[in-house]
């Protein structure tokens, strides 16, 4: 991550830079003994338990997977932190192995009611890291000794341990301690509340010593988003977090946190500020974050442009290429998606992103079985891959296998409770089953997570309509219009509800707005050349069922208002429509001509009054 930010900086002469303000120990660790070097090498080889054992006291002849001997005496802070991190990773590795063992046992047990052959991945949250309690105890003792050494006047000018003091924690040791406390709370492991510090306070202490650890910032944001009390504490004026406000990492953290809160516009503005050519203009990380935010805002063209340029510049980089494949899927660009899949397979066949790209390609080709198989392959490599769970749920919905779809969506919710897509997918599935109260709950969850998305409110309005709660339906449809219903999802439904209530003016306004929105979707660049006439608007819309209903209603509305020419224009657009509305439009045209000829009245033109405003 740090190397990517370095790539984004402008070219400078390193010899002209001022002396580095970071403590040299953090720039290049210099091990005090070959034991540390050996353990570091084992970490690079992913032999985590072996690395932790090398930095631990003599162990018995048989390895114990439940505990590790205490750390070696007189370890320096770097070695102590390395051992703690190695032990944590060994526990995570053991947790994954246990998960796979239980999964295989479920698959082999045909009588197991939890067996799910098609989804192929068993329940989450069963296996646990066996070393968490030991790490909490050891790191807690080291943390207390660190504070004691800081308060000892004899050590005020010496950051290393004396021979009679247990190892202290440096910035990275504190980070591991904060990470371990967060994991323990997440797994609901009972800890003594009075003597155990809060994870976010430990992470802040780590960042004060070394603010360039992006992993610590990420963990801090994740903890804050799940604990409102901790977030309020971080926002207070006297919070230690504000001491880091002059560091660019603080601003990256704020942008990331705003994105988690779905405030994507604020997040985008922060990232774009730091993408100035004089700062991090070429950072692949910032480009990727901007593309992700555009994707969340459904600005597919902007996200496509950024990711395409990033892919062309760095074809061997697969980060965020699954998002790029989602955009190509939405745009139905099968050729580009096929090319992206071929490149991803050649770069790294065994990356979850590669399997996700392949799954999107098969889904676009309507090959559901192969798409599901690809998503399952991605989950076999990373069972916390939320996109694969959600996309597999979509495939099961298309395949009409609602039970498997709901299971996939639920797994996605377990992994990422703040991801709206799985909640929305569950709502859609229950709506297909006509279980509207269940669908209402899941759509409400999706709307809370994504309140600026008109699709969430439109889905809620549809459910309220099914439940005959027309007032609630009108309220949420109006909310959808306030959140910029650019696709016209809510306008036609809201117009029909106004029509049922006899509010003719409001219904006419909504129907006409629906036609305008559909015209903008068909011709997105039409507004650049200035306002268009009503005749131009009507001649350049694609008439489907919803548009035919709107045209017929507006024709009747203007006929009743005495605006016969305008009514005739709406009717004329239905003449070639292959539906019952065509015959009704022809009959109305005859009626309009008869009225004009019989009454000999001057016809009046116009469109619905523009004074209507939607209620909040």
Image (cartoon, helix red, strand yellow):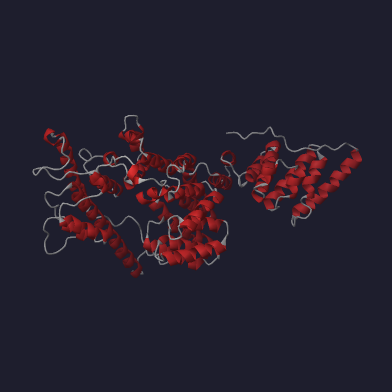
Q: Quadrant of the C terminus?
A: top right
- Residue extending farthest to the left is 164
Q: Nearer the viewer, residue 174 or 482?
A: 174
Count of marks overlaid on the render = 0
Q: At which x and y percent is residue 82?
A: 22, 52
Residue 470 relative to residue 164: left or right: right
Horizontal arrangement in the rendering, residue 586 relative to residue 288 (left or right): right
Residue 477's place in the image compared with 54, above or below, is above
Give percent across and percent down for residue 216: 31, 45
Relative to residue 488, is residue 45 depicted above or below?
below
Q: Position of residue 325 (x, y in %)?
A: 50, 58
Q: Is residue 401 visible?
A: no
Residues 581 and 79: in front is 79
Q: In the rendered image of this protein, does residue 509 appear above or below residue 187?
A: above
Residue farthest along the top direction in this orientation: 237
Residue at 36% across, 61% down:
122
The spot of residue 469 in percent (x, y) is 57, 42
Query: Taking 191 as reference, is 479 left or right?
Result: right
Residue 544 in view here: yes
Residue 369 or 262: which is nearer the viewer? Answer: 262
Q: Quadrant of residue 44?
A: bottom left
Identify the image quadrant of residue 355.
bottom left
Left or right of 416? Residue 213 is: left
């Amino acid at each position: 991550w740090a190397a990517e930010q370095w790539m984004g900086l402008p070219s400078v002469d390193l010899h002209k830079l001022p002396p580095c303000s970071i403590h040299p120990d953090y720039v290049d660790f210099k091990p005090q003994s070959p034991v540390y070097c050996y353990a570091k090498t084992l970490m690079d080889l992913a032999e985590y338990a072996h690395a932790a054992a090398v930095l631990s006291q003599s162990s018995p002849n048989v390895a114990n997977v439940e505990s590790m001997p205490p750390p070696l005496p007189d370890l320096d802070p770097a070695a102590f932190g390395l051992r703690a991190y190695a032990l944590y990773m060994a526990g995570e590795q053991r947790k994954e192995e246990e998960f796979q063992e239980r999964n295989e046992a479920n698959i082999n047990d045909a009588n197991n009611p939890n067996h799910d052959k098609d989804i192929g991945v068993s329940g989450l949250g069963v296996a646990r890291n066996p070393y968490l309690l030991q790490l909490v105890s050891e790191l807690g003792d080291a943390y207390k000794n660190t504070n004691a050494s800081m308060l000892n006047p004899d050590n005020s000018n010496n950051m290393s341990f004396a021979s009679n003091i247990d190892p202290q924690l440096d910035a990275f040791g504190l980070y591991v301690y904060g990470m371990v406390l967060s994991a323990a709370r997440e797994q609901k492991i009972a800890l003594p509340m009075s003597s155990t510090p809060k994870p976010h306070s430990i992470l802040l202490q780590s960042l004060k010593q070394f603010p360039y650890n992006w992993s610590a910032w990420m963990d801090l944001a994740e903890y804050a988003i799940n604990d409102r009390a901790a977030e309020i504490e971080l926002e207070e004026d006297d919070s230690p977090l504000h001491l880091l406000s002059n560091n660019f990492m603080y601003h990256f953290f704020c942008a990331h946190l705003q994105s988690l809160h779905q405030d994507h516009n604020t997040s985008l503005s922060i990232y774009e500020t730091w993408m100035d050519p004089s700062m991090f203009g070429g950072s692949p990380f910032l480009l990727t974050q901007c593309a992700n935010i555009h994707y969340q805002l459904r600005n597919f063209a902007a996200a496509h442009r950024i990711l395409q340029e990033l892919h062309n510049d760095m074809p061997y980089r697969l980060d965020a290429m699954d998002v790029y494949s989602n955009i190509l899927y939405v745009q139905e660009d099968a050729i580009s998606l096929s090319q992206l899949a071929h490149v991803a397979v050649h770069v790294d066949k065994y990356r979850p992103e590669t399997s996700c790209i392949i799954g999107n390609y098969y889904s676009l080709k309507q090959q559901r079985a192969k798409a599901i198989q690809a998503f399952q392959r991605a989950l076999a490599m990373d069972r916390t891959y939320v996109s694969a769970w959600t996309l597999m749920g979509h495939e099961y919905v298309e395949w009409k296998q609602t039970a498997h779809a709901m299971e996939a969506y639920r797994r996605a919710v377990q992994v990422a409770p703040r991801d709206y897509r799985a909640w929305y997918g569950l709502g859609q599935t229950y709506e297909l089953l006509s279980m509207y109260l269940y669908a209402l709950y899941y759509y409400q969850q999706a709307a809370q997570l994504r309140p600026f998305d008109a699709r969430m409110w439109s889905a809620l309005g549809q459910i309220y309509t099914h439940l005959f709660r027309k007032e609630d339906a009108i309220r949420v449809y109006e909310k959808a219009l306030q959140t910029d219903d650019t696709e016209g999802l809510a306008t036609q439904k809201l117009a029909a509800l106004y029509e049922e209530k006899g509010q003719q003016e409001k219904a006419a306004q909504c129907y006409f707005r629906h036609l305008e929105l559909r015209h903008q979707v068909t011709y997105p660049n039409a507004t650049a050349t200035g306002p268009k006439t009503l005749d131009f608007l009507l001649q350049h819309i694609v008439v489907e069922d919803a548009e035919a209903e709107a045209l017929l209603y507006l024709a009747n509305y203007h006929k009743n208002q005495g605006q016969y020419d305008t009514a005739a224009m709406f009717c004329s657009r239905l003449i070639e429509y292959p539906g019952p509305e065509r015959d009704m439009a022809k009959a109305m045209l005859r009626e309009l001509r008869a009225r004009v000829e019989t009454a000999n009245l001057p016809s009046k033109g116009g469109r619905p009054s523009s004074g209507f405003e939607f209620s909040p």
